[in-house]
Image (tube, rainbow, N blue to C red):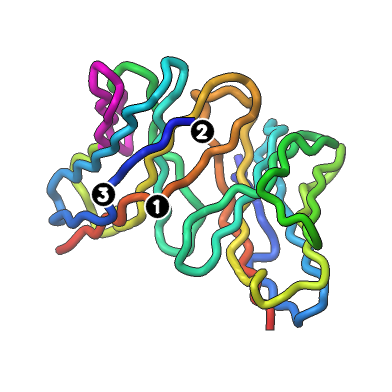
Amino acid sequence: DAKTTQPTSMDCAEGRAANLPCNHSTISGNEYVYWYRQIHSQGPQYIIHGLKNNETNEMASLIITEDRKSSTLILPHATLRDTAVYYCIVRVDDNAGNMLTFGGGTRLMVKP
Amino acid sequence: NAGVMQNPRHLVRRRGQEARLRCSPMKGHSHVYWYRQLPEEGLKFMVYLQKENIIDESGMPKERFSAEFPKEGPSILRIQQVVRGDSAAYFCASSPRTAAGYGYTFGSGTRLTVV
């Protein structure tokens, strides 16, 4: 699976949009981009995933560049409860049951 | 629809004892993954199981650790003769299929403390 690079930490003001970048320059054509987050001491929580097109759900939006070498997770109106470590993961789709490999993630601190 | 259930939430064991961690996947999910998170570290994959089969155990320590997912009942992660270094949070995830494009659902974890 392709490796991802994320900033170690970011701050965001409460109520503003949080834009979390992720580089995955070696991504393959059949690899999806997944985003998870882990709020302190809790289990990881699925946020969103995509292959080529931009995606939006009730939690966030995922913007994937046309060459698929990078993506951005957008939390449109960050709240204090969005403070967490955010993980960007790419995973091949080959029905082999490949596990999700978590890197260091981005520690997002939402401040009042 | 209950999520992934892990129990116990907290487990304290003395060095040398056995620890048994249980994971009940979401209804309809037949794939289970175990991860370990040491204090102040990231999540590390341990093992992937389907019903009655271990599919990938590349992340499992060679000794003292075992996992099963029987036809009936929860998946069990078993740690024999625990040592202080086994103290960690153990998370279980489940999914209904193996293909990408479907996210895993994680449980709340079991915090193991070895004293």
Residue B78 showing in the rendered view: no
Q: Is residue B57 left or right of residue A109?
A: right
Label placed on residue A7: 3
Q: How crowded is mark 2: few (under 14 residues within 10 Å), some or many (20 or more)?
A: many
Q: Label 3 is found on which chain of the structure?
A: A
Secondary structure under tag 3 reads loop
CB atoms of marks 3 and 1 within 8 Å: no
CB atoms of marks 2 and 3 within 8 Å: no
Secondary structure under tag 1 reads loop
Task: Name the residue tied to disc 2.
Answer: B103
Q: What residue type is labelled 2?
A: Gly
**C-alpha span from label 3 to label 1:** 9 Å
Q: Label 1 is found on which chain of the structure?
A: A
Q: Residues within 10 Å of mark 3 (few under 14, many from 20)?
A: some
CB atoms of marks 2 and 1 within 8 Å: no
Residue A89 showing in the rendered view: yes
Q: B36 or B110: nearer the eye?
A: B36
**C-alpha span from label 2 to label 3:** 23 Å
Residue plotted at (23% across, 37% down)? A74
Q: A111 or A85: nearer the eye?
A: A85
Instruction: Say which of marks 2 and 3 sits in front.
Output: 3
Q: What residue range appears in magenta? A: A55-73
Task: Name the residue tied to disc 1.
Answer: A104
| Residue B83 locus on image (x, y percent) | 72, 75
Residue plotted at (63% across, 39% down)? B94
Q: How crowded is mark 1: few (under 14 residues within 10 Å), some or many (20 or more)?
A: some
